[in-house]
Amino acid sequence: MPNENVKIFTDDDQISVCFYIENPEIMDIGEQLSEIDENAYMNGYNWEAVLNCYIENNAPELLDTFETDSEAGLYAAYFENTGEGKTNAETLAEIITSLTEDTEKLFDFVREYGGEIEWD
């Protein structure tokens, strides 16, 4: 279930998952990640890089179901407005929520896969 940092929006054409990375608790997580890996300056592009690598390794069925348009302060993913798109958007939102609520899982992932993440 998404939290205050992750929101799902639906319009006629698409479903959007927005991850607000400038919220203080997410900024704190980003600072901790940069202590683990010096490449982890956690803007929207690097959150995208981490999430892409995580999805590739843990939920590869999602890989080709969405497009992203991240910015400095936001990670955004867009899905088709279909039943499958809704399910996939909810899955992505749950992944983001899980990683930001169980930060040790996120930190362990970056420790293990930091060399594979395509940092910005």
Image: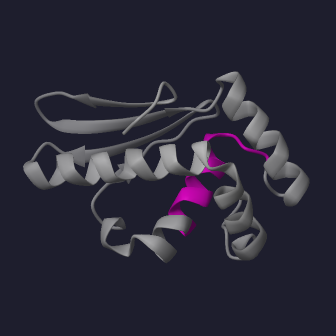
- When the figure is inspected, residue 65 is found, relative to residue 8, above or below; the finding is below
Camera-nearest residue between 108 and 23: 108
Q: Which residues are magenta?
A: 41-53
**Which residue is at 57% across, 51% downward?**
99
Q: Is residue 11 visible?
A: yes
Q: Is residue 120 visible?
A: no
Name the side, left or right, on which 116 lies relative to 98: right
The answer to which of 64 and 3 lies nearer the viewer is 3
Q: Position of residue 83 (x, y in %)?
A: 9, 49
Q: Measured along the vertical axis of the image, is residue 71 above or below residue 60?
A: above
What's the residue at 46%, 66% (across, down)?
A: 55
Q: Residue at x 90, y 52 (%)?
A: 35
Q: Is residue 79 left or right of residue 113?
A: left
Q: Is residue 44 magenta?
A: yes
Residue at the location (40% across, 48% down)? 94
- Quadrant where the C terminus sits is bottom right
In this rendering, the count of numbered labels is 0
In the displayed structure, would residue 39 be above or below residue 113?
above
Q: Quadrant location of the N terminus?
A: top left
